[in-house]
Image (cartoon, rainbow, N blue to C red):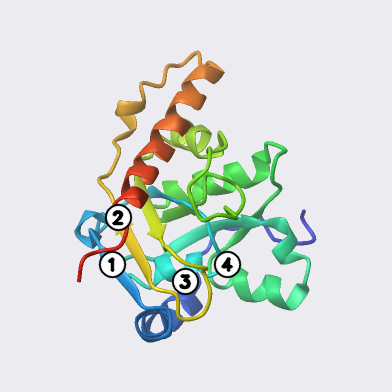
Amino acid sequence: MSELYDFSKVKEYKLYTVLTPLAKAVCKTVQKCTYVGTENIPKKGGFILACNHQSSFDPIALGGSGKRVIHFMAKEELFENKALGIFITHLNAFPVVRGKGDMTAITHAEQILQNGWVLGIFPEGTRSEDYAPKRAKSGVALIAKQTGADVLPVSIYTDEEYKRGTRLTVRFGTLIKNEEFGFTEEGKSRELKEASRRIMDEITKLWEEGHCKK
């Protein structure tokens, strides 16, 4: 993992901000994104942004809201190509080994939140082939528990094949305060499962609202 990414430092790169206007333009003109509930995005402070996952375009769709810089947790395979790895690193992404309880990535995520930055996570851990939200892995709840961070549920909705020009509705929900999860110091696995389910349930409710009525 050390060969793919330098976990010794936590940075917020300028390239993300530089490219945000381009991302907004692409989301508006090419991908036809409609944003709902952006007033729910905290203007400052660290929190976890948790969203369902359908396409590699999802981070751009979320960043296209233009409200906050987002540090995305991304699958480590994307960093195996050195040029791509450098590029997405400068877009504030960092790698995680999926399905193995990657504590290096989780510790890095905690540092991002402690800096007052936004951590972007796709709790399902992989893309949904039929575009409907699926069960969440426990990683998002584990990070929320260890950092005390609040969680902002978000959904990306489409009722057709997700491709260039597909209409998307990005809906931001109400912030889930960390104390609502009822985490205890003993930290039983049941707590993480219930918190993960709560987060994904909120995302699914947003997704089920469908497209914004224009």
The residue that label 4 is drawn on is 56
Q: Are marks 2 and 4 in contact (CB under 8 Å)?
A: no
The residue that label 2 is drawn on is 172
Whichever of labels 2 and 4 marks the residue nearer the N terminus, that label is: 4
- What label sits on residue 74 in the rendered view? none
How would you rate the neighbour count of disc 3 (Cα within 10 Å): few for under 14, some for 14-19, many for 20 or more?
Answer: some
Q: Are marks 3 and 1 in contact (CB under 8 Å)?
A: no
Measured as percent of width and height from the top left, residue 142 is found at 52, 33
Q: Are marks 1 and 2 in contact (CB under 8 Å)?
A: yes
Whichever of labels 1 and 4 marks the residue nearer the N terminus, that label is: 1
Establish if 72 lies above or below 143.
below
Nearer to us in this view, 151 or 31? 31
Amino acid carrying mark 3 in the image: Ile
How would you rate the neighbour count of disc 2 (Cα within 10 Å): few for under 14, some for 14-19, many for 20 or more?
Answer: many
How far, Cα to Cα, is label 2 from label 3?
15 Å
How far, Cα to Cα, is label 2 from label 4?
19 Å
Q: Please report the residue visible at 47 percent of the width from the left and 20 percent of the height from the top.
A: 191
How far, Cα to Cα, is label 1 from label 2?
8 Å
Q: Are marks 2 and 3 in contact (CB under 8 Å)?
A: no
Check disc 2 and report its element: helix, strand or loop: strand
Total numbered circles: 4
Mark 3 against mark 1, which lies toward the viewer?
1
Nearer to us in this view, 12 or 165? 165
How would you rate the neighbour count of disc 4 (Cα within 10 Å): few for under 14, some for 14-19, many for 20 or more?
Answer: few
- What label sits on residue 60 in the rendered view? 3
Whichever of labels 2 and 3 marks the residue nearer the N terminus, that label is: 3
